[in-house]
């Protein structure tokens, strides 16, 4: 089904898309998705069933969100990211339900304590992961399923656990390059699947020029 606001987007009739949302052509929005006002979704994205995307979230092109993903305000997702089922983002470091004097609920709108999170291009996040507030996931990083990410993860890193730690590195194609000890003694490593070369310097993996 299509929505007249988005003529080149497939939208399930049960999806709720608020005013002021932008969705790029070729994208698909599945059943019971809720997208809040001010959010921008790029071209050829997939938003899986029962996913919730809060106010003013920025999502690039060619992004895959599986079922039941929760993305809160202040999250930016760059191109080519995969976020697996039931991943949850958070944006408040000191959350409370009520004002200190118990006079009312805390407001839901962003405040000075709402922290920005950015997911760089090519990142993969495994199912049931929790992403803490105010962090950056470096490009092509891979987050293992069930991980609780409480700090920024560098590019091409393989991180998992609770809290998540860097245990190795992966190529842009997703193939493992080796653990941190192995790569620390090698000046250059090449991916066995795609052949791309990388160099590790001070814990930061960078691709070699093509």
Image (spheres, rainbow, N blue to C red):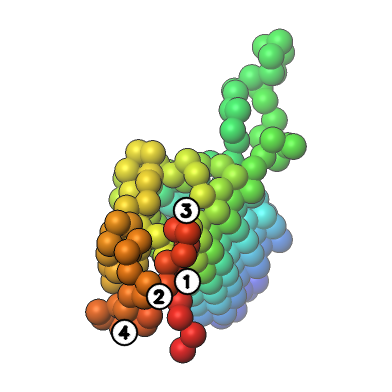
Q: Which residue is mark 4?
A: 195
- SS category of the residue bearing label 2: strand
Q: Earlier in the sequence, mark 4 or mark 3?
A: 3
The residue shown at (59%, 28%) is: 95
Against 164, is 82 above or below? below
- SS category of the residue bearing label 4: loop
Dot 4 and dot 2 residues touching (CB under 8 Å): no
Name of the residue lying farthest toward the right? 112
Q: Earlier in the sequence, mark 2 or mark 1?
A: 2
**Residue 14: percent from left, percent from top:** 47, 57
Dot 2 and dot 1 residues touching (CB under 8 Å): yes
Q: Which residue is mark 2?
A: 198
Horizontal relation, residue 63 to residue 194: left or right:
right
How far apart, in angstroms, are the residues tagged by discs 4 and 2?
10 Å
Dot 4 and dot 3 residues touching (CB under 8 Å): no
Name of the residue lying farthest toward the bottom? 210
The residue shown at (59%, 45%) is: 134
Q: How many marks?
A: 4
Q: Which residue is mark 1?
A: 206
Q: In the image, which disc is placed on residue 153?
A: 3
Residue 184, by quadrant, is bottom left
**Residue 78: percent from left, percent from top:** 56, 67
How far apart, in angstroms, are the residues tagged by discs 2 and 1?
5 Å
């Amino acid at each position: 089904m299509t929505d007249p606001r988005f003529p080149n987007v497939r939208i399930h009739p049960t999806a709720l898309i608020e005013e002021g949302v932008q969705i790029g052509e070729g994208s698909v929005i599945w059943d019971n998705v809720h997208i809040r006002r001010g959010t921008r979704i790029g071209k050829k994205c997939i938003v899986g069933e029962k996913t919730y995307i809060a106010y003013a979230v920025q999502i690039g092109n060619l992004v895959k969100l599986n079922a039941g993903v929760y993305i809160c305000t202040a999250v930016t997702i760059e191109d080519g990211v995969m976020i697996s089922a039931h991943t949850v983002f958070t944006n408040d470091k000191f959350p409370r339900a009520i004002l200190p004097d118990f006079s009312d609920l805390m407001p839901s709108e962003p405040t000075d304590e709402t922290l920005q999170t950015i997911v760089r291009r090519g990142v993969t996040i495994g199912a049931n992961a929790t992403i803490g507030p105010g962090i950056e996931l470096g490009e092509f990083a891979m987050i293992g399923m069930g991980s609780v990410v409480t700090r920024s993860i560098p590019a091409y890193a393989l991180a998992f656990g609770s809290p998540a730690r860097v245990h190795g590195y992966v190529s842009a194609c997703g193939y493992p390059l080796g653990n941190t000890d192995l790569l620390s003694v090698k000046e250059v490593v090449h991916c066995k699947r795609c052949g791309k070369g990388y160099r590790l310097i001070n814990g930061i993996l960078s691709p070699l020029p093509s």
